[in-house]
Amino acid sequence: MRKIDIFDTTLRDGEQSAGINLNTAEKLEIARQLERFGASVIEAGFPASSPGDFEAVKRIAETIKRSTVTGLARAMKSDIDTSWEALRGAEQPHLHIFLATSPIHMEYKLKKTPDQVVDIAVEAVKYAKRFFPLVQWSAEDAFRSDPAFLVRIINEVIQAGATTINIPDTVGYASPQEYGALFKFLKENVTGMERVKLSTHCHNDLGMAVANSLAAIENGADQVEGTINGIGERAGNAALEEIAVALHIRKDFYGVETGINLQEIKRTSQLVSQLTGVVIQPNKAVVGKNAFAHESGIHQDGMLKNRETYEIITPELIGETTAPLALGKHSGRHAFKDRAISMGFELTDEQLNEAFGEFKNLADKKKEITEDDLFVLFTGKQIEYSNVPTYELTNVQVQYGTSNVPTATVSATIPTGENVVVATTGAGSVEAIFNTLEQLVNGQVHILDYRVTSIGKGRDALGEAVVNLSFNGEVLTGRDVAQDVLEASAKAYLNAINRKLIKSAVKVKEPVS
Ligand code: KIV
Ligand code: ZN
């Protein structure tokens, strides 16, 4: 079967979404999971865009061995030099250069003529090939470019040494028929296309990113780019888990395979959602909470008679376990460790002890511990921040009554090591907590977004809070989980502030085995 490479850009195009700010350790944890997921290429960031991106790309390039690691660069020497410094430690150094080719981008953004754009592209690819064995060249806004000009510039960059050609629908304007036709046209008209990989990269502005990507595959694309959960700027990118499952379920039609480990989909999706704070819509295909829920009586009846009446994808296919969790408050460390291993977490003894302590506390409060709860406990345990002093919540208490002014009292350890108690009021419980924390952190805080969701089902489900705020002008997102949503909210707020403190000073603990 024809093999389609999966190029994951969750950590580059996905991370460009409003409000996402992952630190190096979190990016590395996602990259490790993408490697398990089976991504052929992981785009780890844009090294020349910031020191944080540079450091993350370098760490990921040095760590990940089973997927090719790449970084994005503009078509300029300084970006290519910086990218080489970040990527030279990779198993198979790969660079991704982009340059716009549509009339509107060339005239207004680049202020260059088409001839100049061809020269810049060729020079950049030639220069990159001095260092990188693998160079992908992207025609930014390719879909709105003149197809004849695309043929001309692609001919030239292939001659210059590009090994992959990417045809992005940067603004999500294409329809599947048109986008597929463009791939067919390029396949038929570019000289040497059979020597390079042809790649698709779609945005979801009109909700057609996945359909367009599949149309490109039908018309000869060898590689498909996208992000987990479809995160990305504006309406996002093509959702890779949807593409992987569509190609698997409909292999009778598409006749291709991806090498993706479908069993890792659920976990990859949850990890990306938890670390980015981007909640998955309940009805999202493949990974939404309701993707396998059958509500109507007729459907349930059909399912009981034969699951295939209404189920084309099983939850098991994507690694969602429906089996009850045989763990409770009397379970021992050994069973707990086995569970962590079977869920794919490689934890050190110290990390395991910490998670076990949290599990026992939770089991005291919660009737039934679910796999989702355990996932939350284990996620992030591999991340250890260096000894950057941060804010740690010790206690939060709220006095609330329908006819009283809500008052919050917070005690916390502050970065100097002191324990401080602050109290103030607000129009509601959450506002009272946030006002109190603003006094504690001593800066200007504006709340931009705030969400609480439940992890799993039932009245004793864990609550997850995500707070998007600006702190002294810098936009940060924090998240945390607790059984009480007010506690989760206070911790999420402090998590956002702490991110600023630890931004570049992170270290990642390696698992023992
Ligand atoms: O959408 C786009 O055009 C991109 C390029 C940088 C490949 O993300
Ligand atoms: Zn893009």
Image (cartoon, rainbow, N blue to C red):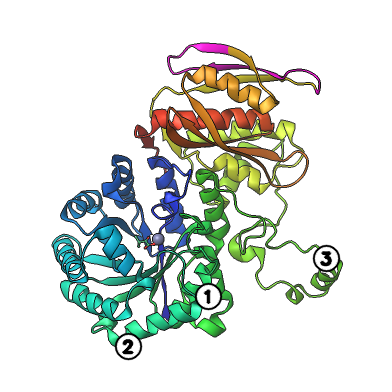
Q: Nearer the viewer, mark 3 or mark 1?
A: 3
The residue under label 1 is 247
Which of discs 1 and 2 lies nearer the camera? The answer is: 2
The circle on residue 296 is 3
Q: What's under tag 2, amino acid-wise?
A: Glu
Q: What is the three-letter code of the residue carrying label 3?
A: Ser
Q: Quadrant of the C terminus?
A: top left
The x and y percentages for residue 17 are 46, 50
For the residues labelled 3 and 1, the Cα–Cα distance comes to 28 Å
Nearest to the observer: residue 500 or residue 118: 118
Circle 2: element type: helix
Q: Quadrant of residue 320?
A: bottom right
Q: Is residue 102 visible?
A: no
Where the N terminus falls, by quadrant? bottom left
Marks 2 and 3, how far apart at CA? 49 Å
Specify the amino acid type for callout 1.
Leu
Q: Residue at x 59, y 45 (%)?
A: 375
Magenta span contains residue 397: no
Q: Position of residue 215 (x, y in %)?
A: 48, 78
- Confirm whether the magenta stretch covers residue 414: yes
Q: Which mark is residue 178?
A: none
Looking at the image, is mark 3 or mark 1 earlier in the sequence?
1
Q: Which residues are magenta?
A: 402-421
Residue that carries the numbered disc 2 in the rendered image: 188
Q: Label 1, label 2: how many angstroms apart (C-alpha)?
A: 24 Å
Q: Dots 3 and 1: beta carbons under 8 Å?
A: no
* 293 over 258 or under it: above or below: above
Q: Is residue 112 visible?
A: yes
- Mark 3: give few (<14), some (14-19) or many (20+) Cα within 10 Å: few
Task: Name which of mark 1 and mark 2 comes first in the sequence.
Answer: 2
